[in-house]
Amino acid sequence: MIALKTPDELELMARANRLVAQVLRAVKAEAKPGVSTARLDAMAEAMCRDAGAEPGFKGYHGYPYSLCCSVNDEVVHGFPRPEALREGDILSVDFGVVLNGFNGDAAMTIAVGQVSPEAKRLMEATERSLAAGVEKMRPGMRLGDVSAAIQAVVEDAGFSVVRQFVGHGIGRALHEDPQVPNFGKPGRGVELKPGLVLAIEPMVNAGGYEVKVLADGWTAVTADGKLSAHFEHTVAVTQDGPRILSLP
Ligand code: MF3
Ligand code: CO
């Protein structure tokens, strides 16, 4: 069942998602060589609580931290660690909050110092694929239009979209219907209506799309050890087109 949001609910969702975006902006400013991801996690959680919100991921299905920190070949759901980030790493950070009963959820991949041209190209293609998906968030379009737009950008750049994890509806729950795959066919799937809110989150691998989950039960890594990037926005369909809620 897909729960469309009222205009009042959209404003509450905008507040939760604005906080997520502000936290991610602060995390990005701090993510330099020599800084640990554990420190970024502590910072994100403190900012969240100071704003009167709860971290959205901590305790969700047992995830133990507030921030997901996935470095290089880690795709999503990596654990924050006490070891320092190194020049050339790419760091995917994913953060969520609950504020006034509504979830915010967004993610970005950050270059730590100078990164390789290939890493830069991967990050840019992933962010562009998210923008292409967002652009389809209009009344009358279908879910498959969003998925196909993402996939086309990624594959035109020579990269692959992860199949095993998908985007999702979001609202009072972090994960609501529908699922939002980052691959699909235009014109298929449910029709998009004003009030639909989706977390769109392409996960893009430099090599093959296969991933595996480590023994910690959470950390997803690329099967071939190549780099992976992840960008996510929470976006509402409005009469006037897409409204990205997760902006600072
Ligand atoms: N953006 C991710 C998702 O929506 C983050 C979830 S991490 C979890 O699936 F720990 F909360 F599962
Ligand atoms: Co999400």
Image: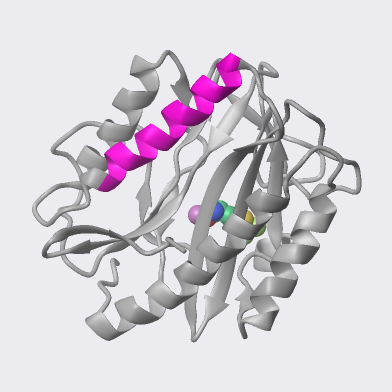
Relative to 128, say whether 193 is above or below. Answer: below
Q: Quadrant of the N terminus?
A: bottom left
Q: Nearer the viewer, residue 124 or 129?
A: 124
Task: Verify whether residue 188 appears in magenta.
Answer: no
Residue 220 percent location from the top left of the image: 67, 37
Quick check: can you spot residue 64? Answer: no
Residue at the spot x=66%, y=51% of the render? Answer: 29
Task: Residue 36: tell me if it is visible.
Answer: yes
Residue furthest left as drawn: 140
Residue 25 relative to residue 44: left or right: left
Q: Main secondary structure of the magenta part?
A: helix
**Residue in the image at 22% along x and 70% along y:** 195
Residue sitting at x 19%, y 52% = 190
Judged left or right of residue 16, residue 183 is: left
Q: Position of residue 240 (x, y in %)?
A: 12, 62
The answer to whether 95 is drawn above or below residue 107 in the figure is below
Q: Nearer the viewer, residue 80 or 111?
A: 111
- Give me the residue at 39% from left, 81% from top: 12
Indicate left or right for 128 with 195 as reference: right
Percent x, y of residue 17: 46, 68
- Residue 95 place in picture, x, y as percent: 60, 59
The relative height of residue 77 versus residue 100 in the rendered view (above or below) is above
Residue 164 or 88: which is nearer the viewer? 88
Residue stretch rendered in magenta on the structure: 117-134
